[in-house]
Image: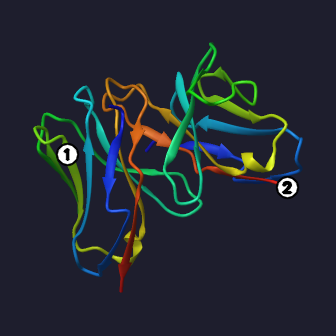
Amino acid sequence: GAVVSQHPSRVICKSGTSVKIECRSLDFQATTMFWYRQFPKQSLMLMATSNEGSKATYEQGVEKDKFLINHASLTLSTLTVTSAHPEDSSFYICSARDQSRTNEKLFFGSGTQLSVL
Amino acid sequence: QQQVKQSPQSLIVQKGGISIINCAYENTAFDYFPWYQQFPGKGPALLIAIRPDVSEKKEGRFTISFNKSAKQFSLHIMDSQPGDSATYFCAASSQGNKLVFGAGTILRVKS
């Protein structure tokens, strides 16, 4: 099956630093990737839709200057949390759609646990 | 309009029993209804999905029942096992657009 690789799986950083999270589709091309945020025991909240070669589309209430998304190739999207603060601590998950499939399956990465001290 | 309401919040089932999780939606434009399983510290994994042109889909021990008129769909896990203990999310989307997730159900299967 299709695989989405997310890295790193866990990161601890100091307040004020920036953190980059990578999301790669390993065996398919993804013109669209999605970034989610999940707090403990809560559902996934869509942050933004990442489009290859164009600007990301952010959900209401998500600061685009805070959460920078780059989708430079058909297999890689990155999320950079700029000037991270403790309230940014969360589980971040990416997903990608294998558009070669007709059943629109969405595959998720394994997530990144961000802890900001 | 965009919400997907999921119940129960948590569920405890004996080993070998049937786990049932329900979801309801309002947006009649939704045309894809997947269920995801998530273990702690991991991303969600697609379990099974259905489209509104069928009323039921079965894959192994997992079955989706879909009621288009009631705008409801449910996940049945037959012969539930301790290894099924996880959080389950229903979701819905329209024409390949972004998924809307339910709030999740924490399932615990007691051995």
Furthest residue toward bottom: B111
Q: In this view, does A8 lie to the left or right of B56?
A: right
Q: In which quarter of the image is residue B53?
A: top left
Which residue is located at x 58 percent, y 51 percent?
A: A110
Q: Which of A6 and B67 is in front in this view?
A: B67
Q: Residue B108 carries which label?
A: none
Q: What element carries label 1?
A: strand
Q: Quadrant of residue B84?
A: bottom left
Which residue is located at x 16 percent, y 46 percent?
A: B66
Quadrant of the drawing holding the N terminus of chain A: top left
| Distance between the alpha carbons at the discs numbered 1 and 2 | 43 Å
Task: Rate crowding at label 1 as few (under 14), some (14 to 19) or many (20 or more) other CA atoms within 10 Å.
Answer: some
Residue A117's place in the image compared with B27, above or below, is below
Quadrant of the drawing holding the C terminus of chain A: bottom right
Of all chains, the one bearing label 1 is: B
Residue B62's place in the image compared with A82, above or below, is below
Tell me whether marks 1 and 2 sit on the same chain.
no
Label 1 sits on residue: B72
Q: Which of A45 and A22 is in front in this view?
A: A45
Q: Where is residue B40 in the image (x, y as percent from the top left)?
A: 55, 64
Q: Which amino acid does label 2 sit on?
A: Leu
Residue A43's place in the image compared with B109, above or below, is above
Q: In this view, does A76 lie to the left or right of B88?
A: right
Label 2 sits on residue: A117
Q: Which of A37 and B61 is in front in this view?
A: A37
Q: Where is residue A42 in the image (x, y as percent from the top left)?
A: 51, 54
Of all chains, the one bearing label 2 is: A
Q: Is mark 2 on a helix, strand or loop?
A: loop
Q: Position of residue B100 (x, y in %)?
A: 40, 37
Q: Position of residue B111 (x, y in %)?
A: 36, 86
